[in-house]
Structures are given as structure tokens and as C-alpha cells.
Amino acid sequence: MKKTRRSEIPTSVRSQIAQFYEGSAVARLKCVVTNEYAERQLHHLDENPNNSKIQYNLLPLRADLNINIENRKSHALNELITSEGLKNRSAQYYSEGRFAYGYACSILGASLAANTPWNSDHPETYFIDAETAIFLLQMRC
């Protein structure tokens, strides 16, 4: 299947994302998993790169982690973005009172556990882990 071009992310949506995660519409975004300013991209939770107009579908990730997710059809996930890695990171953020970051790790883990890559050639080869998805969603409460 041919890869679709990413749609442009509107400036207003980027500002809303910065406001949610950093508390300021003009703040530099950090990766929600590593808390670093390293090169980052906005990850589409629904994994459709054309769905860029809804702020709740996007979260800032280090570029290499986002690429790892996109390539998970043929590569193992980085330990930081496995369900266990995201559970631990989310729990850490919640314990520190960093709820937006905790939410981001929980929802990323839930989406990875519940979604087949949107452009998968063989969706039947993906194991959808409903139990992990539900656990990570419950962490948000």
C-alpha cells in the first residue's frame, strides 16, 4: 500500500497542543514520553497522518519514537513505548502531578494496544490487546 502524504498541522492546533501539555500556547513542546526537547513530531493517535485538525488526536513525541511506531509492522517497539514502559512512565507522571503527560502516556499506550496500524498490509497479524488498552485508559482516572 502506498504511503499517504501527511496533512499540514494547523498553527492553531499546534498552539492548543502546547497550551495543554506545556501551559502556554507559545511554549516549545517536549516529548511526552522522555520529557526532552529533542527533535519531535506530533504523533497521530488514530495513526492516520491526514487527521491533523483535532488537537486530541495529536501528541508530541521524540521523532525516533514516532518513526518506531510507524514502522512497528516490521520492527519491535522501543522499550520506552511498550505497554510496560508507558505504564511506568504514566504512573511516574501522575505521582508527580504532571497529569497532561501522564494522560499522554496512558492514551498512547491504549491506542497502541487497541489499534491496528491504519495502513497495514496484513491487519490480521496484529494482536489487539484489549486488556492492556483498558488498563491504560483506567490509569487516566
Image (cartoon, rainbow, N blue to C red):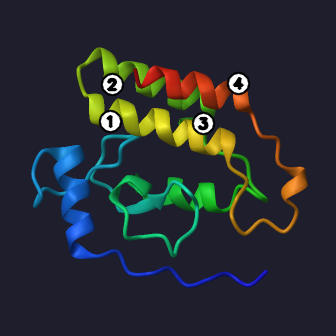
At horizontal 38% and vertical 33% (from top left) the residue drawn is 103
At horizontal 16% and vertical 51% (from top left) the residue drawn is 19
| Distance from Cα at disc 3 to Cα at disc 4 | 19 Å
- Quadrant of res 15: bottom left
- Between circles 1 and 4, the one closer to the viewer is 4
Three-letter residue code for mark 2: Tyr
For marks 1 and 4 on the same chain, the one whose residue lies earlier in the sequence: 1
Three-letter residue code for mark 4: Glu
Three-letter residue code for mark 3: Glu
Identify the residue under disc 4: 131
Mark 1 touching mark 2, by CB under 8 A? yes
- Between circles 2 and 4, the one closer to the viewer is 4
- Between circles 1 and 3, the one closer to the viewer is 1
Residue 93: numbered disc = 2
- Between circles 3 and 4, the one closer to the viewer is 4
Identify the residue under disc 3: 79
